[in-house]
Image (spheres, rainbow, N blue to C red):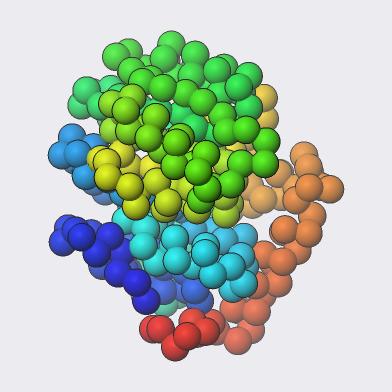
Amino acid sequence: MASPDSSRTDVPKDLVRIGEGRVNIGTQADLIDRIIADAKAGRGGTVFTLNLDHLVKLRSDAGFRTAYDAATYVSADGSPVVKIARRQGAPVDLVTGADLVVPLCRAAAAAGVSIHLFGTSDAIRDEAAAKLVADIPGLVIAGSESPPRGFDPEGEAAKAAAGRIEASGAGICFVALGAPKQELFAHAATRQPGGVTYVCIGAALDFISGRSKRAPVLFRRTGTEWVWRFIQEPRRLGMRYARSMAYYLGYLIKGPEKPRDGRG
């Protein structure tokens, strides 16, 4: 396994490995504190949130595995991942990208750290930015852009985008491209010189803008947010959730999945 951020000595050790995935952050408060400290110190890094869909994709996508293995911080995103981790003895809480954005922005504003928004559509991103600035006094958005259609997260356009993000002076960049594209971009971006922490957040900006409605609190508290999202977008999410549920049922029946290359 590649060492997470091998140039750094302060990256937390893994709390648990789940198949090809890993988690090394237990709480949202710890993650926010670490991201802000890194941003103020000019240390670059990546933040991923491991969910069942990622675990499925990690089985077959070597580039995705490389990005995950090198990630600075990885949290447990989704009730099933939290349950798997706890059954393996890891003290982790649920830390999702959707729940992370606003409190991290508040902490960034308080610390004088500016942010950058990258991904989703211009309209959604602009609406989310306006809402964040209105709700969080002192928040500075140093830059904001969407990649072009057909964007290669590891190509020349990605390198140029990373250069613009670094030049903006932002300490934190929220990446909203969906998996695995956002993780591949974040990993590639941190291989260039710079001090930005790239936080992969999936559909979080869609929720903040109001364009997509997040599941009611009851669904989130009971770990059934996926049911709400499936009801909203059955065609797009049906196959993804079917594969994810098959993975989870396989874990419940067979126990922890061993990494394919023998890592433990």
The image quadrant that residue 135 belongs to is: top left
Q: Is residue 190 left or right of residue 125?
A: left
Question: Which residue is located at x 58 percent, y 46 percent?
Answer: 152
Question: Which residue is located at x 54 percent, y 58 percent?
Answer: 51
Position of residue 178 relative to residue 142, above or below, is: below
Q: Is residue 88 left or right of residue 124?
A: left
Q: Is residue 234 left or right of residue 90?
A: right
Q: Nearer the viewer, residue 209 or 217?
A: 209
Estimate the x, y position of residue 228 in percent, counting from the top left. 71, 44
The image quadrant that residue 75 belongs to is: bottom left
Q: Nearer the viewer, residue 133 or 85?
A: 133
Question: Which residue is located at x 75 percent, y 51 percent?
Answer: 237
Quadrant (top left, top right, bottom left, bottom right) of the N terminus? bottom left
Estimate the x, y position of residue 25 in percent, counting from the top left. 33, 57
Estimate the x, y position of residue 32 in percent, counting from the top left. 29, 41
Quadrant (top left, top right, bottom left, bottom right) of the C terminus? bottom left
Position of residue 254 relative to residue 23, above or below, is: below
**Residue 84 in view:** no
Farthest residue, direction right: 235
Q: Nearer the viewer, residue 183 or 249?
A: 183
Question: Which residue is located at x 65 percent, y 79 percent?
Answer: 250
Q: Number of numbered discs present?
A: 0
Q: Is residue 216 left or right of residue 65?
A: right
Position of residue 20 relative to residue 35, above or below, is: below
**Residue 147 in view:** yes
Position of residue 170 relative to residue 16, above or below, is: above
Estimate the x, y position of residue 191 in percent, counting from the top left. 34, 52
